[in-house]
Image (cartoon, rainbow, N blue to C red):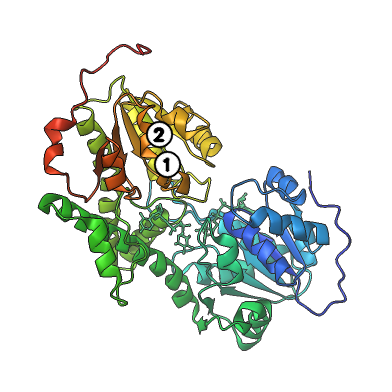
Amino acid sequence: MKATTDAPEIDRSVNAPRISVIGTGYLGATHAAAMAEMGFEVFGVDVDPKKVEALSAGKVPFFEPGLPELILKHVKSGRLRFTTDIAEATALSDVHFICVGTPQQRGSNAANLKFVEDATAAVAANLTHDGLIVGKSTVPVGTGMRLRDIVASVIPAGITAELVWNPEFLREGKAVMDTLTPDRIVFGGASEKAEALLRTVYAAPIATGTPVIACDLPTAELVKVSANAFLATKISFINAIAEVCEAAGADVSVLADALGHDVRIGRQFLNAGLGFGGGCLPKDIRALMYRSSELGAYSAASLMQQVDEINMGQRQRVIDLALTALGGSVLNRRIGVLGAAFKPHTDDVRDSPALNVAAALHLRGAQVVVFDPEAGATAKAMFPTLTYVDTIEDAVTDSDALLVLTEWAEFVDADPVAMLDLVHTPVVIDARNCLDADAWRAAGWKFRALGRPVPVDEQPAALTTGPIRTLVGAR
Ligand SMILES: NC(=O)c1ccc[n+]([C@@H]2O[C@H](COP(=O)([O-])OP(=O)(O)OC[C@H]3O[C@@H](n4cnc5c(N)ncnc54)[C@H](O)[C@@H]3O)[C@@H](O)[C@H]2O)c1
Ligand SMILES: O=c1ccn([C@@H]2O[C@H](COP(=O)(O)OP(=O)(O)O[C@H]3O[C@H](CO)[C@@H](O)[C@H](O)[C@H]3O)[C@@H](O)[C@H]2O)c(=O)[nH]1
């Protein structure tokens, strides 16, 4: 069944290129809305009829600040339509953005390119007039060249289409702002004509001074992957240093602030803790690992392997902190978990370190009670056996240990004095180095974090929290 909006017919007399956006997930829905905001008529296309139905009604099926307002605004204006009918969208558009997923393949570090190949082939096969196909998905270097062959093999006779790459750098939680005002715009493999068209599409951010980097196809693909690899490396670097800090009694938060004053280093992405997750960094560094090895570029592959290992090790280190805090076992202990999303301002739990730790503790026999302001439903769908509650207080109440796993503002701002009355044992593990350690300690909490010193009067032995209660439901 095909789902479309009831918006008025698009005026085909206008000169501006009309745009289709194939794949309306986190990237595509935001890109489609932003293109409409920049003044274009846009078709969002997805194979998921429920997503299309929701978006057509101006509803965003995931949490992204500012996006519902923008989608609704342009669905109402008639500038933005959603459909499952790629033929309709392709026929009515001139520039076709490929925004489908490139997840990690099962059983391999390689990216699964099936969706990108299918979407590109579908656009090319349905072209009724010349067009520009613009890849935005994150792909391993060399993908664009292969897609050009696919386009050539399915495009109708007499029609031409150029395929270029224009990677996207938006962050979830800030996706709207990042799309409307990007740091830079990269065009890969564009002819003069295609570049001129892309400059028309991005005229608004270019007019405000956003730098444009026009380069070849492989460089554009690699810019994106390298950006994520660098961010991941920065996080794993500070987490490795956090381990040294712990061993030496130093404080990684103070150290990161001091490093950050050096403009060559910068303070961003130096927050030590539970490490990176989400739908991008983990799978992108693995895809780079795989692709570099394929190309015989082993240094990048081994660097990414190390970055990944350090990152995944952080999850175990938080689990170990919880085990130590509870005297070596979490069996039948109640653990309050604050945070399930992979970072604040999103409901995305794809490869979420928070959910991973919560689930691991549950599997070790703990009674894990999770609260996340936005990601409760997505977390429940992915890991239904945990207990999910609706308030911080419900997660904290009666807990033997409290774990802060995602640094939502309401956790950072929570009052440690008020919380103290609710817990069974006042032990808090700040896995994101986001709490005021002094305030929590002053309120009477045992405070633990990665890469932070433990006060002399709080040596590990003093952390044991009394007899382990072994009866389920004993409280
Ligand atoms: N999420 C981000 O913050 C972000 C930022 C920059 C780049 N990226 C990259 O963008 C791509 C998409 O990521 P996402 O997070 O939006 O994924 P997503 O899973 O949220 O969305 C992908 C969408 O594509 C749809 N789809 C799959 N095959 C299709 C087809 N043949 N035709 C039409 N629709 C199809 C799916 O139904 C889904 O709605 C990935 O390559 C990702 O690495 C993501
Ligand atoms: O100092 C820091 C900063 C971030 N993180 C973690 O790193 C992960 C990723 O964070 P972030 O990069 O903000 O999230 P994404 O929305 O996944 O964005 C990344 O991935 C996108 C998809 O490729 C890119 O477009 C963005 O530029 C890139 O930042 C999260 O789990 C964070 O908790 C840390 O552990 N320490």
Q: Dot 2, how many residues are within 10 Å of its Cα: few (below 14), some (14-19), or many (20+)?
A: few
Q: Dot 1, how many residues are within 10 Å of its Cα: few (below 14), some (14-19), or many (20+)?
A: some
Is label 1 in a helix, a strand or a loop?
loop
Left or right of 364 in this view: 114: right
Which residue shows up at 23% across the image and 38% down it? 321
Ligand 2 shown in quarter: bottom left
Left or right of 456 in this view: 171: right
Q: Position of residue 7 (x, y in %)?
A: 85, 57
The amino acid at mark 1 is: Ala
Residue farthest along the bottom direction in this orientation: 192
**Which of the two marks, 1 or 2, is nearer to us in this view?**
2
The amino acid at mark 2 is: Ala
Left or right of 280 in this view: 147: right
Residue 21, by quadrant, is: bottom right
Q: Position of residue 426 (x, y in %)?
A: 29, 31
Task: Say if 349 sits above or below 39 in the image.
Answer: above
Visible residue check, residue 87: no
| Residue identified by numbered label 2 | 418
Which residue shows up at 50% across the image and 77% down it? 217
| Residue identified by numbered label 1 | 414
Name the one closer to the observer, 396 or 305.
Answer: 396
Q: Quadrant of the C terminus?
A: top left
Q: Position of residue 228 (x, y in %)?
A: 40, 64
Q: Quadrant of the N terminus?
A: top right
**Dots 1 and 2: beta carbons under 8 Å?**
yes
Q: Position of residue 179 (x, y in %)?
A: 59, 67
Which residue shows up at 34% across the image and 60% down it? 232
Is label 2 in a helix, a strand or a loop?
helix
